Image (cartoon, coloured by chain):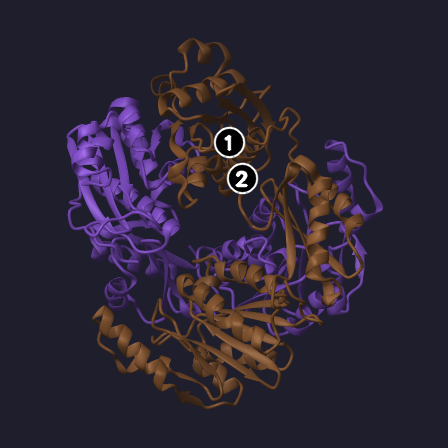
Chain colours: A purple, B brown
Amino acid sequence: MLSCNSRPRQVLVINVGDELLDGLRENGHLLWLGEHLARRGLPITRSLVVRDDAAEIARAVGEAWGAYDLIVTTGGIGPTSDDHTREAVAGALGLSLTHVPAAEQALRDRFKMIGRKVAAADLSQCYVPAGADSLPNPRGTAPGVFLHRDGRALVMLPGPSLELRPMFEDEVVPRLRQVGCACQGEAYVQVRTFGIGAVPLEAIVRPLLAPGMALSFGTHTGVVDARISSAGGGATADQLCEVARRIRDAVGEDFVATGHACLATLVVEQLRSLEKTVALAESCTGGLLANAFTDVPGASKVFAGSAVCYANDAKVNLLGVPDCLIAQHGAVSAECAAAMATGAIEKFGSDYAIAVTGYAGPGGGTDADPVGTVYFGYASPTGVWSQRVALPGDRRQIKQRAVNTALDFMRRKLNKYRVEDLIHGA
Amino acid sequence: MLSCNSRPRQVLVINVGDELLDGLRENGHLLWLGEHLARRGLPITRSLVVRDDAAEIARAVGEAWGAYDLIVTTGGIGPTSDDHTREAVAGALGLSLTHVPAAEQALRDRFKMIGRKVAAADLSQCYVPAGADSLPNPRGTAPGVFLHRDGRALVMLPGPSLELRPMFEDEVVPRLRQVGCACQGEAYVQVRTFGIGAVPLEAIVRPLLAPGMALSFGTHTGVVDARISSAGGGATADQLCEVARRIRDAVGEDFVATGHACLATLVVEQLRSLEKTVALAESCTGGLLANAFTDVPGASKVFAGSAVCYANDAKVNLLGVPDCLIAQHGAVSAECAAAMATGAIEKFGSDYAIAVTGYAGPGGGTDADPVGTVYFGYASPTGVWSQRVALPGDRRQIKQRAVNTALDFMRRKLNKYRVEDLIHGA
């Protein structure tokens, strides 16, 4: 890792699209760009969402140009009648649009390949504000735009994620580095934890920071991330990594990973390295735990499957949980969780199994086990464990927290940590 | 439904929070507020995300006040040292903060109930800019703020969703109606479809609109929504509903619902009214289809469970798919999908079953069945069907599209529609 920006940059992201303002689509671009810009030493200063309206886009860019080191727009650069970003930006900056022959050739080649006719409107995409680069888009038709002018940069990215993300990585980051706007390496280190809250984590981390380091936290249904960055270039990359190592040591068994790997990915990797397999038995998580495993590419190497048994009959018929056990202890109990885990190992023939049963709400629950009570079972070649936790939130949050807790339970067991006193922090 | 705003309102949403700009948390508030403001005739004109920084918040509010009819802020009104919204807004508007005795009493009562001591910092939450209402927050400690001044409204909402949403519905909407800012009823109708793309849907819908009606589209991995609203009060609520009925008739079997109900909720409701149950057999959706069912509160009445069988052995052992069938046709085949569905009905004892097997990528696939190929099986008391579709996107998108397609498949079968020529539009 090399040194980073010596002064903080002012960064504005402008997302264009009616659907983002009408509650029709999540602004996933902001989440993704927020992380990827911060990693290059360009944390977003402000973000703006505007409608597919040429005057609105022009007004937003006109107001911002001169006040920001970097402006990134997303959306509105396609060929349809509600794509206005290209013209509006050029107009706001007082630049004419110039034709890029190479962009037209690439567009014609791509259309030929996919058997589509080139219409006049399509060719509007082959223009850029004078002096800008046209950025190739091998996954779609709309090329991006990179403009560097008066020491400031403006980038236009296409709306579809599958086009935006590789274009940002492959075309934009190298140019931002070239003009001295982005860091050469990574601008922060992130320490991911589970089982410790943000407040106790801050109490551990804060005293370990050197002057010139900034700290921020992210919490995701039980997972707590601490990010340490160099405020104004006051710390080197090596110093950041050294602090991350010291945090890791201080956090102990609650330390999950350095970086952005999710719990499911880490468990899958650990199982792959052990050449072991896992099966699941899910009641209240209702398939969400299986989904976390199967979101990991290549999970099929270690993931046998999941018996999602909502009905009690299904617990008996698919997992072989004894009728009388459910009658005596109830389906939401430590005993049932253990029996489900044992059943999953037997039915799937796996090395390990995790079971989850609980009350996700809004209905259900008892005085002793109210909504949010979840029992976990874990079976391995050496034994069976179960554990009870109380999780906050609504139905979906309880499901997600139960998934994270189950994955963390397995992480701890695979690491041979003690799990009896697991604490839920965030 | 009563009449709505006679002129379009200018609405600005300001979300406060470093975590939204650093890629640490999705801006779920914008999605939720976008829908719920639009339903009251207040589509968002522009949205802004700013950092937890008093000067930034004050600058944003100062720039905007006077230009918007309604400003909504989220976050930054709690008791901690990085909560600045209350003071920053008052400062930007040149208003002093005044103490609200009723808010302090409510806070003291709540703290007593949860056994927490009131600290000096907590009491900062009991102040509002002069002339504003303090909005009760029975689910948290930070009261909201409603300010109406010079014909304009400014609302401050707390950051946690579980507090923000009921406060908006219970405290903010009635006040916005009282001051004539929000519609008395619903401001648009939404027609939800599946199987028809946005472009052909627009060709059907556009000619049915009366003057003064505006049209927008939302697409969500196969689901395409058309929203018809009254632009500037040019159409009455009855006229909007009449148009929705005519769209429904014109769209035919691709019509899913009027409103916001998701496919899983509709299928669960349909099964409840029929008093029938369903089970699943999932390979490539990996639990995501089960999760769609179990996200619906009360799904346990109709949802027996899902056998998520990633490994071929699991398909044989849990679902009774014959070894030789997999050997002859492959696990990704119409035959295997049909056998999985039949197996699910038998093992779970359900009335219906859906099975999904395919290649979600990035690995896998064959020349004949490349990544994105998914086979669905459907078993009912009267027979077994299977179907092949080709779905675009990356691993997660293919999983989500497969889930929506499976649910739509079941919707059509329950409605006794033909399913052979299902088209994937969006």
Dot 2: within a 10 Å radius of its alpha carbon, few (fewer than 14), some, or many (20 or more) residues? Answer: some
Residue at figure coordinates x 21%, y 38% from the top left: A330
Q: Position of residue A171 (x, y in %)?
A: 61, 50
- Report the quarter where the C terminus of chain A lies: bottom left
- Horizontal side of A426 relative to B70 (left or right) equals left
Q: Which residue is mark 2?
A: B397
Q: Quadrant of residue A378?
A: top left
Q: Which residue is mark 1?
A: B360
Residue at figure coordinates x 36%, y 39% from the top left: A289
Query: Quick one: SS at disc 1?
Result: loop
Marks 2 & 1 on one chain: yes
- Horizontal side of B364 relative to B417 (left or right) equals left
Query: Quick one: SS at disc 2?
Result: helix
Q: Nearer the viewer, residue A16 or B309?
A: B309
Q: Amino acid at mark 1?
A: Ala
- Residue A126 in sight: no
Q: Position of residue A43 (x, y in %)?
A: 49, 64
Q: Position of residue B320 (x, y in %)?
A: 38, 16
